[in-house]
């Protein structure tokens, strides 16, 4: 089992939660499973994947940052398989339960801990899209394969690759000099359908027409731009796996 669940740090939890709901996410129905190390203030479900929120102090270093994280069914088994595949992983308790910390060749570190197999979330065309910017694209691709993510689309130039997680959510690797995580979404339909809800929630989404489809760009309450991309139909210059 593998589900994408990035973690956003925010100094304004109610406004951040409202933003996600205006985008179409719904509050998670389940509680953290026994043995989970997860300590979140809120978790929200998209049609595929989840986003967790954690409150932080205004002006702190954490404010506005996103961490790459995953839900797994069995932390020890996940760690064993990841290590056997060739990617570095360590188990830790950290006082809250068992977690696996994975470290990729570019230094990117992310956590996988116990999550529910089924979320009970209503079906929707919205998917969480975690972003992994890195100068070592090949290393990131290997690490995602080692944790069980499945390749979906790759650029023929080799500068970006995206993956699906079996139990929900997407991860995209993009070439960039400095390693960093990020948060975006993918929408299987016309993204203009989301404008009304975002606008009613106080956001100012901008429709961007690109060669491969439309996107929305919107400023999130935690201070970063969030992109909502239409699911790519034009695969010119890409390979579908």
Image (tube, rainbow, N blue to C red):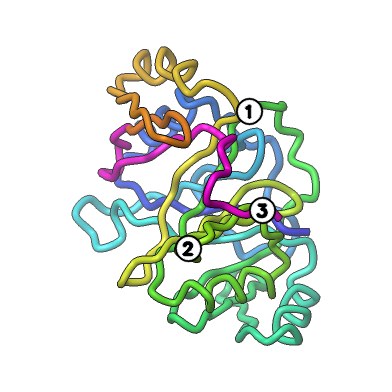
> Tag 3: Cα neighbours inside 10 Å, few (<14), some, or many (≥20)?
some
Relative image position of residue 126 (x, y in whole percent): 59, 32
Relative image position of residue 82 (x, y in whole percent): 71, 79
Depicted 28 relative to depicted 69: above or below: above
Q: Residue furthest left?
A: 59
Task: Decide which of 159, 192 is in the foreground and name it.
Answer: 159
Residues at marks 2 and 1, CA–CA distance in whole angstroms: 28 Å
> Tag 1: Cα neighbours inside 10 Å, few (<14), some, or many (≥20)?
some
Residues at marks 3 and 2, CA–CA distance in whole angstroms: 15 Å
Q: In the rendered structure, which segment of residues is drawn in magenta?
A: 218-241
Relative image position of residue 228 (x, y in whole percent): 45, 35
> Which residue is at 45% across, 44% downward?
184
In terms of secondary structure, where does tag 1 sit?
loop
Depicted 184 relative to depicted 94: above or below: above
Q: Nearer the viewer, mark 1 or mark 3?
A: 3
Task: Decide which of 208, 71 is in the foreground and name it.
Answer: 208
Q: Residue furthest front?
A: 236
Q: Which mark is residue 157?
A: 2
Q: Label 1, on which residue?
A: 125
Relative image position of residue 136 (x, y in whole percent): 44, 77
**Magenta span contains residue 158:** no
Q: Is residue 169 left or right of residue 135?
A: right
> Which residue is at 63% across, 66% downward?
112
State which quadrant residue 151 falls in: bottom right
- Marks 3 and 2 close (CB-CB < 8 Å): no
């Amino acid at each position: 089992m593998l589900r994408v669940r990035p973690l956003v740090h925010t100094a304004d939890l109610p406004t951040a939660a409202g933003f996600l709901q205006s985008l179409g996410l719904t509050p998670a129905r389940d509680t953290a499973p026994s043995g989970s190390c997860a300590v979140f203030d809120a978790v929200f479900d998209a049609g595929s994947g989840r986003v967790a929120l954690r409150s932080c102090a205004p002006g702190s270093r954490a404010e506005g940052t996103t961490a790459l994280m995953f839900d797994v069914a069995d932390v020890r088994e996940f760690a064993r398989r990841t290590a056997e595949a060739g990617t570095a992983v360590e188990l830790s308790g950290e006082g809250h339960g068992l977690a696996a910390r994975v470290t990729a060749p570019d230094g990117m570190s992310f956590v996988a801990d116990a999550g529910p197999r089924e979320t009970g979330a209503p079906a929707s065309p919205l998917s969480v899209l975690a972003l992994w910017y890195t100068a070592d694209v090949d290393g990131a691709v290997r690490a995602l394969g080692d944790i069980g993510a499945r390749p979906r689309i790759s650029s023929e130039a080799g500068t970006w690759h995206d993956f699906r997680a079996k139990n929900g959510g997407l991860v995209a690797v993009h070439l960039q000099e400095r390693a960093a995580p990020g948060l975006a979404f993918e929408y299987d339909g016309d993204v203009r359908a989301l404008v009304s809800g975002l606008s009613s929630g106080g956001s100012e989404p901008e429709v961007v027409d690109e060669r491969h489809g439309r996107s929305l760009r919107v400023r999130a309450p935690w201070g970063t731009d969030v992109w909502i991309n239409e699911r790519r139909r034009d695969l010119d210059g890409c390979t579908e796996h």
